[in-house]
Amino acid sequence: MPFSPFLLALATAVISFASPPGASTVSIVINHGTIYQTEKAGDPTQGFLQIHNSGDADTLTAANCPLADTTSLVGPNNQPITNLGIPAKQDVILAANGPHLQLTGTHFPVQFGGIIPCSLTFKNTGLISVFLFAVPAP
């Protein structure tokens, strides 16, 4: 089922920050955010997205999706990781077979097509708000 042009535009959260003189420049773009739908409240789920960095290196230090009691950054083995390096002028993909978001204690079912707000905290860039679109789990 294709997304409408409105949803496609909403799916891409583009954030660029201007730094004060003498400070490093960080330009983070986040898009293609998805989350697996769930059957009922309380079911855990996973979130995925692409982080594009066209500036200096940064570090993803935290994530928060109010849909869940806990939003954790986990590695490919589902073990929590405290931070994730975002190299300068490179892309980092949070995917099922790599680092991704793990949401536990969901407050309501995640229905197909739903839009879930989340925020990501970066060491240098700060807080960035994103949207994850609900898709069926494989």
Image (spheres, rainbow, N blue to C red):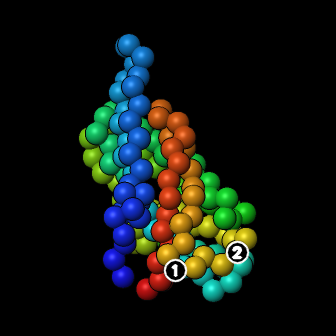
Tag 2: amino acid: Phe
Q: Name the residue at 39% across, 25% down.
A: 18
Q: Position of residue 130 (x, y in %)?
A: 50, 53
Query: Of the numbered discs in the image, which one, if any, rests on residue 128?
Result: none
* Left or right: where 2 falls relative to 115: left
Query: Of the numbered discs in the image, which one, if any, rests on residue 112?
Result: 1
Disc tally is: 2
* Left or right: where 91 falls relative to 115: left
Q: Is residue 129 above or below residue 70?
A: above
Q: Is residue 72 above or below residue 112?
A: above
Query: Of the numbered discs in the image, which one, if any, rests on residue 108?
Result: 2
Badge 2 density bin: few <14, some 14–19, many ≥20, Cα 10 Å: some
Q: Quadrant of the C terminus?
A: bottom left
Tag 1: amino acid: Phe
Q: Is residue 69 above or below residue 2?
A: above
Residue 78 seen in the current view:
no
Residue 52 seen in the current view:
yes
Q: Position of residue 91 (x, y in %)?
A: 30, 51
Distance, label 2 to label 1, CA atoms, is: 13 Å
Q: Name the residue at 63% across, 86% down.
A: 39
Relative depth, front residue between 16 and 47: 16
